[in-house]
C-alpha cells in the first residue's frame, strides 16, 4: 500500500535524480556556510529549521509526479524562501523585499495553478507522466503551456518579472545563495519537466527563445553597470536564466538542464565568497583589445567551439537551432581567452588556446551526458533555423563586439549625449525598488 502511494505521488527519472542531487549538494554547502555565518543571530535556530524545510520542499517538488503535490511543494518552497529573505521582520527594507517577492510568486502560482487545472480538465489525469504521454494540440493546451511559461518566468526572474530578484539583496547571504543557486532555477526545471508538451508547439518555442535572449542581453548589460557585488550577481543571475530559457526555446532542453546545473553550483560559490570580493586582485582588461590580441582570441574561440562541438556532438553545419549554441560557445571562448591574452607573448597564447579547448571539451561533455541520459525522455529536438534564431545570433555577436570596441579613443573626450542618456536609462532600470533600499545605516534593524 505504501509503495503504491509512493509510486502514485512520485516519479524518479534522470531529471528528478539530477535535481535532487544538485539541491542536496548545494543545501549542504549553504548550511555549512550558514552554521558559521549566522552565529550569534537571535533567530539562528529558526533560520536553520526553515532552511531544512525549504530544501525538503524542493526535493519533493522535483520528484513529484502528481500535479497537486508539485503545486503544493512549489508554493511551500516560495513561502519558505520569502521568510528566509525577510528574516528580520522589523527591518522595513527587508519587509518590502518580501512583499515584492510575494506578489511575484502569487502571480506565478496563479498561472501554474491555472495551467494544472487545464491539464486535468483536458486529460483527466493527475499524473504528470501520464499527461506527457497524451497527444493533445488543442488551443486549451496551448493556453495551459503559456500560463505555465509565465509561472516559470516569474520564478526565474525573466524580464519583465525580474525586479523581485534585483530587490532581494537584503537577504542574509546563505538565503541569497540558496535563492540564486536553487529556487531561481525552478522555472527551468518546470519547463524541462513538461518539455514533451512544449516540443509539439514550435511557434511557442520561438517565443520562449526571443524572451530568453532579451532577458540574457538585458541582464548581462545591467551587470556591467553595477558597483555593488550582490546587485551585480543578481543581474548576472537574470542574464543566465535568460540564456537558460533561450536554450529551451531552441528545443535543446538537456543543454538548458546542463546550464542550470553549472549555474547553480557557480552562483552558490559566488554568493558564499562575496564577502571576500573586496580583497580580490583586479586587473585592467585593456579594452578595446589590440588587433593582434583580438585575432588570437578568435583563434582560441575557434578551438573552444570546435572542442565543444566535438564533445557535445554538435556541428557548425547542422542547419538547425544548435547553430545558436555553437555561436555562443565561440563568443564565450573568445571572451574567456581575452584576460589571459592581455600579456602579449607566445606562452600566454598557448595557455589560452589549451585552456579554452579544455573548457569547451568539459562543458560540451556535460551537455552530451545530459542529452544521452535523457534520450528516453525525448527532451532533445533541435528546431529548424528561422529568422528569430538568426537575429539572435546577430544581436549577440554585435552586443559582444560593442562591449569590446565601443570605447572612447581618448580618456579626456566627452562621451556622446546618446551614450550618456542610454547609460543613465539602463542604470536606472536596473535599480531595485526604492522601498527595498536602506538609505541610511540607522534604518538597518538587524537585532
Image (cartoon, rainbow, N blue to C red):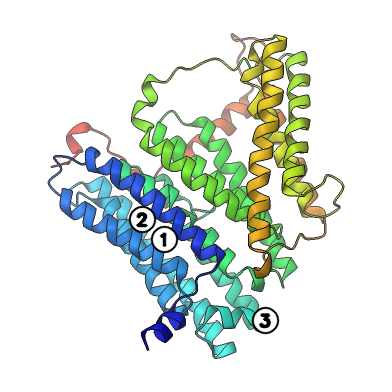
**Disc number at residue 104?**
1
Mark 3 or mark 2: whose residue is earlier in sequence:
2
Residue 196 percent location from the top left of the image: 66, 71
Task: Tell me the quarter of the picture where residue 375 sits.
Answer: bottom right
Quarter of the image with the C terminus in it:
top left
Instruction: Report crowding for label 2: few under 14, some 14 to 19, many 20 or more residues within 10 A (C-alpha).
Output: many
Residue 33 visible? The answer is yes
Q: Please indicate whether residue 116 sits to the left or right of residue 305 in the image.
A: left
Which SS class for mark 3?
helix
Q: Is residue 200 above or below residue 317?
A: below
**Disc number at residue 242?**
none
Report the Cα–Cα distance between label 3 and label 1. Answer: 26 Å
Q: Nearer the viewer, residue 138 or 362?
A: 362
Task: Tell me the quarter of the picture where residue 250 sits.
Answer: bottom right
Circles 3 and 2: CB distance less than 8 Å?
no
Which SS class for mark 1?
helix
Residue 69 percent location from the top left of the image: 41, 77
Quarter of the image with the N terminus in it:
bottom left
Q: Is residue 365 above or below residue 274?
A: below
Residue where numbered disc 3 is placed: 139
State the residue at coordinates (64%, 81%).
133
Amino acid at each position: 500500500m505504501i509503495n503504491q502511494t509512493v509510486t502514485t505521488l512520485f516519479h524518479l527519472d534522470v531529471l528528478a535524480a539530477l535535481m535532487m542531487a544538485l539541491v542536496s549538494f548545494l543545501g549542504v554547502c549553504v548550511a555549512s556556510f550558514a552554521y558559521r555565518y549566522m552565529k550569534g543571530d537571535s533567530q539562528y535556530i529558526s533560520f536553520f529549521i526553515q532552511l531544512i524545510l525549504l530544501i525538503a520542499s524542493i526535493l519533493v517538488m522535483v520528484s513529484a509526479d502528481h500535479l497537486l503535490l508539485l503545486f503544493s511543494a512549489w508554493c511551500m518552497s516560495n513561502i519558505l524562501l520569502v521568510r528566509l529573505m525577510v528574516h528580520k521582520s522589523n527591518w522595513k527594507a527587508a519587509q518590502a523585499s518580501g512583499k515584492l517577492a510575494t506578489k511575484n510568486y502569487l502571480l506565478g502560482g496563479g498561472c501554474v495553478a491555472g495551467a494544472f487545472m487545464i491539464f486535468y480538465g483536458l486529460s483527466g489525469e493527475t499524473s504528470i507522466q501520464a499527461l506527457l504521454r497524451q497527444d493533445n494540440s488543442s488551443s486549451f493546451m496551448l493556453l495551459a503551456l503559456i500560463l505555465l511559461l509565465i509561472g516559470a518566468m516569474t520564478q526565474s526572474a525573466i524580464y519583465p518579472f525580474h525586479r523581485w530578484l534585483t530587490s532581494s539583496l537584503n537577504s542574509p547571504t546563505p538565503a541569497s545563495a540558496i535563492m540564486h543557486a536553487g529556487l531561481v532555477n525552478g522555472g527551468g526545471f518546470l519547463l524541462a519537466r513538461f518539455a514533451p508538451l512544449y516540443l509539439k508547439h514550435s511557434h511557442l518555442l520561438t517565443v520562449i527563445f526571443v524572451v530568453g535572449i532579451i532577458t540574457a542581453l538585458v541582464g548581462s548589460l545591467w551587470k556591467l553597470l553595477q558597483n555593488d557585488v550582490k546587485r551585480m550577481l543578481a543581474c548576472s543571475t537574470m542574464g543566465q536564466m535568460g540564456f537558460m530559457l533561450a536554450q529551451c526555446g531552441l528545443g535543446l532542453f538537456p543543454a538548458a538542464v546542463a546550464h542550470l546545473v553549472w549555474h547553480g553550483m557557480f552562483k552558490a560559490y559566488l554568493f558564499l565568497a562575496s564577502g571576500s570580493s573586496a580583497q580580490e586582485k583586479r586587473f585592467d582588461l585593456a579594452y578595446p583589445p589590440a588587433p593582434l590580441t583580438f585575432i588570437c582570441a578568435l583563434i582560441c574561440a575557434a578551438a573552444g567551439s570546435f572542442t565543444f562541438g566535438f564533445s557535445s556532438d554538435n556541428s557548425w553545419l547542422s542547419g538547425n537551432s544548435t547553430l545558436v549554441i555553437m555561436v555562443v560557445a565561440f563568443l564565450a571562448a573568445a571572451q574567456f581567452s581575452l584576460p589571459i591574452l592581455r600579456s602579449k607573448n607566445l606562452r600566454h597564447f598557448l595557455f589560452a588556446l589549451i585552456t579554452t579547448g579544455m573548457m569547451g571539451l568539459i562543458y560540451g561533455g556535460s551537455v552530451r551526458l545530459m542529452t544521452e541520459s535523457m534520450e528516453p525522455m525525448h527532451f532533445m529536438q533541435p528546431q529548424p533555423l528561422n529568422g528569430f534564431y538568426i537575429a539572435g545570433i546577430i544581436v549577440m555577436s554585435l552586443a559582444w563586439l560593442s562591449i569590446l570596441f565601443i570605447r572612447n579613443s581618448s580618456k579626456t573626450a566627452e562621451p556622446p549625449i546618446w551614450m550618456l542618456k542610454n547609460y543613465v536609462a539602463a542604470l536606472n532600470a536596473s535599480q531595485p525598488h526604492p522601498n527595498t533600499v536602506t538609505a541610511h545605516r540607522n534604518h538597518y534593524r538587524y537585532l
